[in-house]
């Protein structure tokens, strides 16, 4: 209990405690979910929005204006490319995330892009699900032939 109290008193003034983060992909989802044939025609690339959402009750306007955080983004999967660093101000930022599924065999894959910052706590994450079927062979219904991607 004492360590919890010490933590709260030591970090009570940190700006991170007055803000949450909203992560949204280009299609409006909270993560990247690849399972449709058109997802596998080439490496999948999408834009991801990261926006700070301030707690209105205890955040002064001046704090919002001065808000700035630097993150190191990490992902355990070598088939996901993303920026290594992100500097977030008081407005939404877009980053590009690419999933290169070419070397993956059939199966279901899961990974996350997570930020590391000074308190070593994950405050947002981007979830990535990949469901690879049929060894990357899909029927192209517009031309009626099987395509290998």
Image: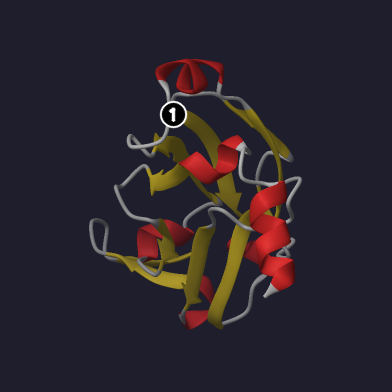
| In-image side of 16 versus 54 (left or right) | right
Residue visible at 64% across and 55% down?
A: 8
User: Regarding mark 1 in the picture, which secondary structure is present there?
Assistant: loop
Image position, residue 130 (x, y; %): 50, 70
Kindly identify which residue carries mark 1: 92
Relative height, residue 37 to residue 99 (above, below): below
Image position, residue 118 (x, y; %): 76, 45
Using the rendered image of the protein, determine whether residue 77 is visible from the camera's viewpoint: yes
Mark 1: few/some/many CA within 10 Å (<14, 14-19, 20+): some
Relative height, residue 18 to residue 43 (above, below): above
Residue visible at 33% across and 34% down?
A: 56
Q: Nearer the viewer, residue 128 or 137?
A: 128
Q: How many marks?
A: 1
Identify the image's colour scheme: rainbow, by chain, secondary structure or one colour.
secondary structure
| In-image side of 118 versus 41 (left or right) | right
Relative height, residue 25 to residue 49 (above, below): below
Q: Nearer the viewer, residue 26 or 79?
A: 26
Image position, residue 6 (x, y; %): 73, 59
Residue visible at 43% across and 47% down?
A: 23
Residue visible at 35% across and 66% down?
A: 36
Q: Quadrant of the N terminus?
A: bottom right
Image position, residue 34 (x, y; %): 43, 64
Q: Nearer the viewer, residue 116 or 132?
A: 116
| In-image side of 3 versus 123 (left or right) | right
- Tell me where residue 66 sits by quadrant: top right
Relative height, residue 140 to residue 26 (above, below): below
Using the rendered image of the protein, determine whether residue 75 is visible from the camera's viewpoint: no
- Tell me where residue 58 sits by quadrant: top left
């Amino acid at each position: 209990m004492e360590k919890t109290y010490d933590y709260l008193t030591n970090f009570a003034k940190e700006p991170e405690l007055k803000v949450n983060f909203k992560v949204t992909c280009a299609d409006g989802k909270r993560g990247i979910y690849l399972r449709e044939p058109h997802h596998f025609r080439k490496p999948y690339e999408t834009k991801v929005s990261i926006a700070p959402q301030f707690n209105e009750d205890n955040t002064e306007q001046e704090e919002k204006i001065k808000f700035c955080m630097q993150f190191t983004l990490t992902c355990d999967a070598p088939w996901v490319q993303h920026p290594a660093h992100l500097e977030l101000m008081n407005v939404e930022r877009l980053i590009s995330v690419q999933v290169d599924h070419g070397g993956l065999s059939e199966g279901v894959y899961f990974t996350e892009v997570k930020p590391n910052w000074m308190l070593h706590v994950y405050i947002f994450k981007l979830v990535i699900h990949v469901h690879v079927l049929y060894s990357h062979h899909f029927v192209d219904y517009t031309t009626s032939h099987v395509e290998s991607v």
